[in-house]
Amino acid sequence: MLFTVLITFILAALSGIGVGGGGLFVIYLSIFTDTPQLTAQGMNLLFFLLSSGASVTVHLRNRTICASAVLVMALFGIVGALVGTSLSARVPQHLLRQIFGGMLIVSGMLSLMKKEEASKEPNGK
């Protein structure tokens, strides 16, 4: 239990600096604790909500949140959550794990390619 708390704290810190701790949390739960994929994804959502609370507070205080963008993202997020939940109830768990793993690999590769392109720009942005 103490090990899981320590790992969760480390992953929350990684998430806070933009490393993607949430995806790592699902991987940790799925592989090292034998948590079923759907349960791990649900725990990841709770993990994300709790760990992002501080970030939202800071952004609200600094007035850096665009209300119209939040509204659009919330609407699409609700639709995506409903469609995803419906599909996940019909897709076998082993296939969900493979799809999730593939998504993490593609997402990581795209992120690395964007960072590589940004480092090649003359102004370093």
Image: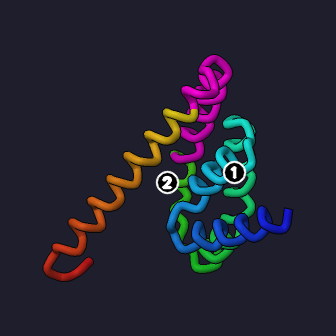
Residue 93 falls within the magenta-colored stretch? yes
The numbered disc on residue 32 is 1
- Establish if 58 lies above or below 70: below
Q: Quadrant of the C terminus?
A: bottom left
Q: Position of residue 91 (x, y in %)?
A: 60, 20
Across and down, in percent, residue 40 comes to 70, 44
Q: Which residues are magenta?
A: 73-96
Q: Is residue 114 above or below residue 28?
A: below
Q: Residue furthest top?
A: 90
The residue most toward the right is: 1
For residue 32, above or below residue 76:
below
Three-letter residue code for mark 2: Ala
Between 90 and 125, the one nearer to me in the picture: 90
Image mark count: 2
> Where residue 57 sits: x, y (%)?
68, 73
In-front residue for pair 48/43: 43
Q: CA distance from mark 2 to mark 1?
A: 37 Å
Tag nearer the camera, 2 or 1: 1
Give the residue pinned by disc 2.
69
Question: Label 1 crowding class (10 Å Cα cut-off): few <14, some 14-19, many 20+?
Answer: few
- Is residue 37 a member of the stretch shown in magenta? no
Q: Secondary structure at mark 1?
A: helix
Residue at the spot 41% in from the left edge and 47% down from the top edge = 105
Q: Amino acid at mark 1?
A: Phe
- Secondary structure mostly seen in magenta is helix
Expressed as whole percent of the image width and height from the top left, the position of residue 116 reads: 24, 67
Q: Along the horizontal axis of the image, is 109 left or right of 68? A: left
The residue that appears at 27% across and 59% down in the rendered structure is 113
Looking at the rendered structure, which numbered label has been put on residue 123?
A: none
Q: Residue furthest left?
A: 122
- Which residue appears at 35% of the width and 58% of the height? 111
